[in-house]
Image: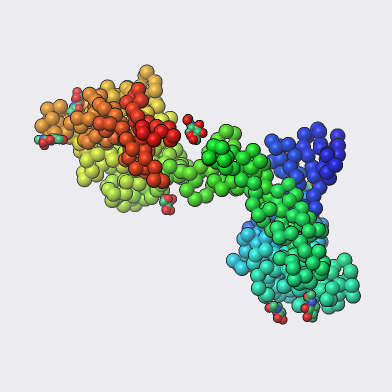
Amino acid sequence: MAARYRNQNCFLYQALNILICALKLGILIFGPMEIDSFFFWHFYLVCQGVTNRLNLLGTKEDHYRNMVKTYSNCTVVLENLEITYMEDHCDLSFLRSIREVGGYVLIALNTASRIPLENLRIIRGHSLYEGKYALSVISNYNKSTYQGTNELLLTSLTEILKGGIKFGNNQLCNVETIQWYDIVSADNTSRKCDSSCFNGSCWAPGPQNCQTLTKLNCAQQCSKRCKGPSPIDCCNEHCAAGCTGPRAEDCLACRDFQDNGVCKDSCPGLLRYDPNLHQLVPNPHGKYSFGATCVKTCPRNYVVSDHGACVRTCSGNTYEVEEGGVRKCAKCDGLCPKVCNGLGTGDLAHTLSINATNIGSFKNCTKINGNIGIFHTSIHGDKYTKTPKMDPAQLDVFKTVKEITGYLWIQTWPESRSSLSPFENLEVIRGRTKRGSRSMVVSGLSITYLGLRSLKEISDGDVFVSRNMDLCYTNANHWQKLFKSPIQSATIEDNASAATCAQRNDTCDRKCTTDGCWGPGPDMCFSCRDYSRDGSWRHLSDYGLFCVSRCPQGVPGEDDTLVWKYADEQKVCQLCHKNCTQG
Ligand SMILES: *[C@@H]1O[C@H](CO)[C@@H](O)[C@H](O)[C@H]1NC(C)=O
Ligand SMILES: *[C@@H]1O[C@H](CO)[C@@H](O)[C@H](O)[C@H]1NC(C)=O
Ligand SMILES: *[C@@H]1O[C@H](CO)[C@@H](O)[C@H](O)[C@H]1NC(C)=O
Ligand SMILES: *[C@@H]1O[C@H](CO)[C@@H](O)[C@H](O)[C@H]1NC(C)=O
Ligand SMILES: *[C@@H]1O[C@H](CO)[C@@H](O)[C@H](O)[C@H]1NC(C)=O
Ligand SMILES: *[C@@H]1O[C@H](CO)[C@@H](O)[C@H](O)[C@H]1NC(C)=O
Ligand SMILES: *[C@@H]1O[C@H](CO)[C@@H](O)[C@H](O)[C@H]1NC(C)=O
Ligand SMILES: *[C@@H]1O[C@H](CO)[C@@H](O)[C@H](O)[C@H]1NC(C)=O
Ligand SMILES: *[C@@H]1O[C@H](CO)[C@@H](O)[C@H](O)[C@H]1NC(C)=O
């Protein structure tokens, strides 16, 4: 089943088609590219770690079980290593596998006499306890029973990349003999050791518990760490913790990244410059950074950030998408997608109307899972449910909404607003839930135009636009184009008469085709007589669809480039290929 692989310290497990390599760096060389994330998780070599601080999770027994589950078989803890509330009867041997910690190490409130962390080499300090400490060893002592931890075995610890050290309220032996200055990167913050220990520094009695010095006794020529006092003992500059030889392959741990057993300052880029093409092209040898390791694919449940790192959640102005089978963080076009509960779902399951109490929950929403209903109580308040009146300006919260999965029902509207402009970016009403057969109702309002200029689809349900006495720009035929099923119907009745509208000059802009429009001005046309300015519907960040008499010809765009567009068969302006310089 296992075969030695290419003279390396690796074994190919054919049954699983994976390659396992024992490495002095503590992490494995990944085998066949497609399988390394599987590989990773299957063997629990990397674990996430926790941030519970001093909290006790359940009973002390629960707490212990949780700790065993978190750290068993783990060699690299990505976040923090927290050892708390461990008592003498607990078997702590599971801690022996840990070699690297990405965040901080907290050892607190334990009474177990010995804490075995003999293999921990490096604490990176990417997150710090109390914002300051990479290693905190506090209150490992019970004042009433006089029980406490007296041996903390950190015999391999030779590097803390960032952060300080805090010891307090302990009953630890030998810690005062440790030369912390050899371990920490930052500025300096000392019973009896075995006679063989250098300079009398140790973690516990016995020759196996001497402190290993990899910095204080280095030759002057060494830039960082060394394995002995002579100049030939200097470690490579990319090493952390120490080394077994001078090369970047000989490090005990890597300062920045570990790529296939070699320490580097960064992972191989995902793009490389092609001198023939004069442009960046995908690098077939590119890798993602995952903790302090370079990987060919991100582990399952991780996404690729825009910096080529494997992350758990997309942050900043990015959101998760799947692209070519890879889950990535993509830049949001305008606001990042945000799904919110509408009426009939989640915390609004039993709420009848949008009102001053709940409207705040729609901030930044782009998709409403459920319904939107605006009734008398929405605007005017309601004594029985102690709902206050709504400020009409609050309705603008819906300007970010592009999709409603249920219905849109508007039966009351502020007198001061002449259109449904808060819904001007709404693109689709799905009608998955309806009231009766209706998925869109606009009734009894004093608006003069609808203004729903982005609406492209009503997937199911009927439309009912009625008793809006001042409403112009209505056209029953237009709705058919938005429907997805032949049984959907539109009822448009009791609006202002065509004569009244013409007299008020409430008619479509002359740039619109005879199909009609959602309201006044060239940005409200259903379709354009000449060309529409932009093929894509770029709301929120741009002006939306506009009718123009010709497509942009060499107008200044982003990054000092000129934008050239041409009209396609649908009379929509499309971007010319970026190589074109004259349109
Ligand atoms: C740790 O690995 C051993 C085998 O190497 C396995 O039997 C055990 O179940 C693992 N423990 C956990 C918590 O995964
Ligand atoms: C100290 O030990 C006593 C007796 O076992 C226990 O009741 C108490 O909770 C312990 N105190 C702490 C701070 O662990
Ligand atoms: C390091 O700390 C010790 C004990 O606090 C102190 O005596 C020594 O001077 C410090 N060394 C440096 C370089 O700050
Ligand atoms: C050894 O200890 C002495 C006294 O504590 C100190 O002066 C000296 O710098 C130490 N040597 C090293 C290499 O740390
Ligand atoms: C207003 O919203 C709150 C919170 O969602 C809800 O409890 C209340 O019933 C609503 N009032 C009306 C009249 O819909
Ligand atoms: C809404 O989005 C803005 C801009 O991205 C952000 O600053 C704000 O915190 C968000 N508010 C909520 C409640 O999500
Ligand atoms: C108002 O509605 C009627 C149908 O009741 C329709 O025929 C008429 O064209 C509409 N008026 C305007 C100005 O759109
Ligand atoms: C109607 O609007 C057009 C342009 O939109 C304008 O030229 C005309 O003067 C307006 N007529 C009235 C009566 O307001
Ligand atoms: C665009 O220009 C680049 C570099 O000059 C060239 O390699 C590429 O083939 C061109 N693309 C097209 C579609 O002509």
Please name the colour scheme applied to the rendered image: rainbow
Residue 73 located left or right of residue 406: right
Q: In the rendered image of this protein, does residue 158 appear above or below residue 388?
A: below
Q: Position of residue 67 (x, y in %)?
A: 72, 55
Residue 428: tell me if it is visible.
Answer: no
Side of 93 where 502 appears, left or right: left
Residue 117, compared with residue 368, is above or below; it is below
Left or right of 305, for residue 529 = left
**Which residue reaches farthest top?**
486
* Front-lying residue, 387 or 546: 546
Can residue 326 be seen in this snapshot? yes
Q: Quadrant of the C terminus?
A: top left
Figure check: 101 above or below 363? below
Q: Where is residue 14 in the image (x, y as percent from the top left)?
A: 81, 33
- Residue pictured at 74% horizontal, 55% vertical: 248
Q: Residue furthest left?
A: 503
Q: Where is residue 542 in the image (x, y as percent from the top left)?
A: 35, 42
Q: Nearer the viewer, residue 270 or 194?
A: 270
Q: Which residue is drawn at 80% across and 49% down?
A: 23
**The image quarter in which residue 34 lies:** top right
x, y percentage for residue 522? 24, 34
Q: Residue at x 77, y 37 (%)?
A: 18
Instruction: Kindly give the residue lying farthest to the front in the view shown.
Output: 276
